[in-house]
Amino acid sequence: MINKIIRDFTPDGDNNRNSEGAFITLKNGDILFAYSRYGGDGCEDGSSADIYASISTDNGESFGEPFELIPRHLLNADTLMSVSFLRMANDDVGMFFLAKTEVVNCRSFFMRSADEGKTWSEPMLCTENEGYFVVNNDRIIRTPEGRILIPAAKHGTICETDEKGRKSVEGIEPGVLYIFASDDDGKSWYKLSEGTTIPYSEGCTTGVQEPALLQLKDGRIRCFMRNDSGRQYESYSSDKGKTWSNPVPSRFTSAESPLSVKRLKNGKIVAFWNPIPIYNGRAEEVNGVWTGARTPLVMAQSLDDGKTFSEPVAIETDDKRGFCYVAIHETDDGTILLAYCAGGEEDGCTLNRLRIRKIKIKA
């Protein structure tokens, strides 16, 4: 199996964090990779961040120097993060991302490019106008009928205000699953569903976090949900995302970190996640640096539409680092590009270093 690191985007003095990106193959064969680049004022999720990009001209064997793609001032935002790409029905490149403003608002926006990423349309709001909606990177899907779905976890925010009237988020309330949709190739967006969550009675205090969608061959949509119970939960929709079954524990044991899942061109499903739950005193810090116990990073595949999965294969095993927020992209030669956070002690946090890796899965 091919398994090699292509590039690390490491933090430095005026760039405190690089994280959470996505790939798309352009019409000329180049691969565009976009991610969040945080400036010198901090590395927290709400610190100043713009969307930067890097291009590969050799099928993912290397990536060029980063350049600014979308600046935060375009949306009067503090932070731009969690990029997803989708090839639109009219052949445009569609880009989705979160914009954080005024501390309490985290909303999903959509832009499209008719010239393969050289220029972009005005940002369009996809979620409600106010609220804290978490949508992970590389998460947007299109159903066979053409409906585009954005899975979001809506959280209430617990804020404090200092003597100068400045707000800060001190905590977030348990998450609730929201689905936002477009039926006209991104021209308009609406709330398709809301309200699904994981009750406290299931040993979960976080509710739904960082949902991921997978379209099944029988038409159902499967949703995986991060939480703090020690296992990914899952829910199903049989009506194109409008209603969802009560969430139940899935087969995936898990740290409090997200699972990433995607169907490949040959029909296989691949999943990447951290399989060891945080219990029995497992450390979330190494030498005072937060790693979230997000190691190892493993992969499993399914040949039967997700009914069963293979035994996990380790992609990363360094117990002094954390690995999370995986973007998955199949290249033209059948290899897979992964991009994920891979920080350790020298980076200050798991989320501060971004890694691109290339793998090839056995047939």
Image (cartoon, helix red, strand yellow):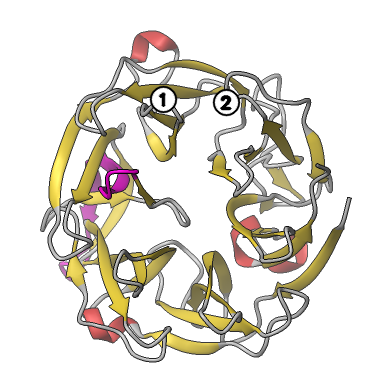
Closer-to-camera residue (244/345): 244
For image coordinates 27% across by 67% down, the residue present is 110
Q: Residue furthest right?
A: 1
The amino acid sitting under disc 2 is Gly
Looking at the image, is mark 2 or mark 1 earlier in the sequence?
A: 1
Closer-to-camera residue (257/170): 257
Measure how far apart labels 2 and 1 are at the Cα level: 11 Å
- Decide if residue 264 is on the left or right side of residue 191: right
Q: Relative to 355, is 117 above or below?
A: below
> Of helix, strand and loop, which one carries label 2?
loop
- Decide if residue 231 is on the left or right side of residue 358: left
Q: Residue furthest top?
A: 201
- Decide if residue 68 is on the left or right side of residue 256: left
Q: Where residue 103 sits in the image (x, y, percent)? A: 25, 62
- The residue tagged 1 is 218
Q: Examine the image and state in which quarter residue 62 appears.
A: bottom right
Q: Is residue 151 magenta?
A: yes
Label 2 neighbour load within 10 Å: few <14, some 14-19, many 20+: some
For image coordinates 33% across by 66% down, the residue present is 88
Q: Relative to 264, is 173 above or below?
A: above
Label 1 neighbour load within 10 Å: few <14, some 14-19, many 20+: few
For image coordinates 31% across by 74% down, the residue present is 78
Q: Where residue 269 sits in the image (x, y, percent)? A: 61, 37
- The residue tagged 2 is 306
Q: Examine the image and state in which quarter residue 118 appears.
A: bottom left
Which dot marks residue 106?
A: none
The amino acid sitting under disc 1 is Asp
Closer-to-camera residue (234/203): 234
Q: Which residues are magenta?
A: 143-166
For image coordinates 78% across by 25% down, the residue present is 311
The quadrant of the rendering that contains the C terminus is: top right
